[in-house]
Image (spheres, helix red, strand yellow):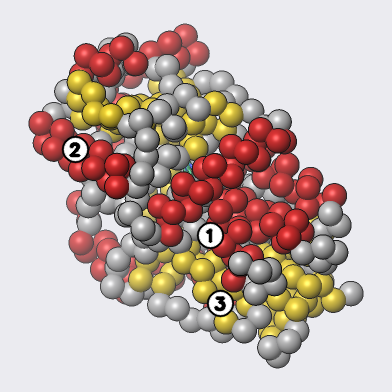
Amino acid sequence: MKYDVIIVGGGIVGLSTAWHLVHQVQGLRVLIVEKERDIALHQTGHNSGVIHSGIYYKPGSLRARNCKTGYDLLLDFCERKGVDYDICGKVIVAVDEEEVERLEKVYERGVANGLEGIRMISGAEVREIEPHIEARAGIWVPQTGIVHFPDVARKMLEDVQSYGGRIRYGARVTGVTTDGQTVTVKTTDGTFTAGRLINCAGLYADKIAGMTGDKQRMRIVPFRGEYYRLKPEKTHLIRNLVYPTPNPAFPFLGVHFTRMIKGGIEAGPNAVLAFAREGYTKTAIHLPELAETLAFPGFRRLAKKHWRFGLNEMKRSFSKRRFYESLRRMLPELEMSDIVYYRAGVRAMALDDNGEVVDDFIVSVRDNIINVWNAPSPAATASLAIGRHIVEQTGMVAV
Ligand SMILES: Cc1cc2nc3c(=O)[nH]c(=O)nc-3n(C[C@H](O)[C@H](O)[C@H](O)COP(=O)(O)OP(=O)(O)OC[C@H]3O[C@@H](n4cnc5c(N)ncnc54)[C@H](O)[C@@H]3O)c2cc1C
C-alpha cells in the first residue's frame, strides 16, 4: 500500500505532525516509522517536563513564536485529553551582582516576547515564593508549568490511530529514495512508499536528512544532561521550579530544580558531550559516532572556543561535589547527602561547520521531503505549534 505521508520518528514532534495531518486532511493515510518498540523513548521521554513560557528566546525567532503558540495549544490539548499538568510558575534567581545584571536582560527579553505578569522581584520576595532559596534578586514567571511529555505523546498517538493513522515499531530507517512523486523508505522491518516523507528523527535527524540528499551544513552533536533527585525527606526544600540566571555565552539554562508532575524534585541537567547519540550513561560509547563527532570541524571549533566550559561540565559530571556546589549556590542549606544520582537525557544539538550552535528550529522542504533538522528545547512545549508549521509546509492544507 502506498501511504500519503510517512513520518520518521515517534517522538513528540513526529506525533504532533501526524496529529495535525490526520485532523486537517480527512482520510489521509499516515504511517509513522519508529525504530524502538514504543514512542517517546528518547528526548521526549528524557526531558525536564517543563512547560516553557518562552522567556529566553530571541524575539521573533521560530523558537519564540512557536513556544508561545505551542504553549496555548498544549494547555488546550491537556485540558481536552485529561492530561495532568500544573501551571505552578517559576523563579529565575541571581545570587550575585553580576547575575543581577544578566537577569535584567532576561527580564527585558521576556517583556519583548510579550510575556504577561512576569516581574523582577527582590531576594525577600524570592523567599516568599521559595522559602529556602537565597538570592539577591529574581524573576517571577507565572506561566511556566510542568507536565509529563510522554503522557502528551501517548494521547497524540491514540488520536492519530483513531483517525486511521498507523505506527510501525522496530522499523529503523536505513535508506530513502525519491523520484519526486513517490518516496521509498527502506527500514529494518520492510520497505514502504508514500507521496511524502517527513523526517522527525531527533538525534538522528541529520542522518535521515543525509539519506534524502538534503545536505545542509549542520550536524547533530549529542549532549547528555544528567539529573540528581532530592531525597524524599528533603523535597520540602523546593516548592516548584527554581532556575539559575542563564549565561548567554552557552546554549544551556544551567542546572535547576524542577518539581515533577508525577512527584519528586529533580536537579539538573548539566551538559556533557555524549560518546553515543543515545548514550545515557558515562560509559556508553559508540565508536563510529564518537569518531564522526570528533572529526567534524564544527565540533572541533566549538570545543576550541568553549574548552573551559566543556572541561568544567565534564568534571561536574564525574564529581557529585561539583554538581552539589552549583545547587548549593541557590539553596545553601542543601547537604551533599540530600541528592542522589537519578537519570540522564541526551539533547540533539545542531552545530554548523563554524562551530556555532544552531539556535532556532530548522525545517527544510525539498520536493516531497521535509526534514526537521533542529527541534531543541522548548520543542516539547512547542510541539503542537511545530507540528502545525510542518504540516503547513507540506502544501496539503490551506494556510
Ligand atoms: C535533557 C533534556 C531536557 C529537556 N527539557 C525540556 C523541557 O523541560 N521542556 C521542553 O519543552 N523541552 C525540553 N527538552 C527538549 C525536548 O524534549 C525535545 O526538543 C523534543 O522532545 C524533541 O522531540 P523529537 O520528536 O524531535 O525527538 P525525539 O523525542 O528524540 O524523537 C525522535 C524519534 O525518532 C526515532 N528515530 C531516530 N532515528 C530513527 C530511524 N533511523 N528510524 C526510525 N526512527 C528513528 C527515535 O527512536 C525517536 O523515537 C529537553 C530535552 C532534553 C534532552
Q: Is 396 rendered above or below residue 38?
A: below
The CB of the residue at mark 1 lies under 8 Å from ligand 1 = yes
Q: Nearer the viewer, residue 187 or 239?
A: 239
Q: Quadrant of the C terminus?
A: bottom right
Q: In the rendered view, does 45 fall on the left or right side of 128? A: right
Gap between marks 3 and 2 measured at Cα: 38 Å
- Amino acid, disc 3: Val
Q: Earlier in the sequence, mark 3 or mark 2?
A: 2
User: How crowded is the residue under tag 2: few (<14 C-alpha within 10 Å), some, or many (20+)?
Assistant: some
Residue 175 visible in the shown view:
no
Q: Is 89 rendered above or below residue 195?
A: above
Q: Secondary structure at mark 2?
A: helix
The CB of the residue at mark 2 lies under 8 Å from ligand 1 = no
Gap between marks 1 and 3 measured at Cα: 19 Å
Q: In the rendered view, does 84 fall on the left or right side of 264? A: right
Q: Nearer the viewer, residue 85 or 60?
A: 60
Q: Nearer the viewer, mark 1 or mark 2?
A: 2
Q: In the rendered view, does 23 fall on the left or right side of 374? A: right
Q: Position of residue 10 (x, y in %)?
A: 68, 55
Residue 203's tag is 1
Gap between marks 1 and 2 measured at Cα: 34 Å
- Amino acid, disc 1: Leu
Q: Is 163 rendered above or below residue 265?
A: below
Residue 365's tag is 3
Q: Secondary structure at mark 1?
A: helix
Q: Position of residue 198 (x, y in %)?
A: 65, 69
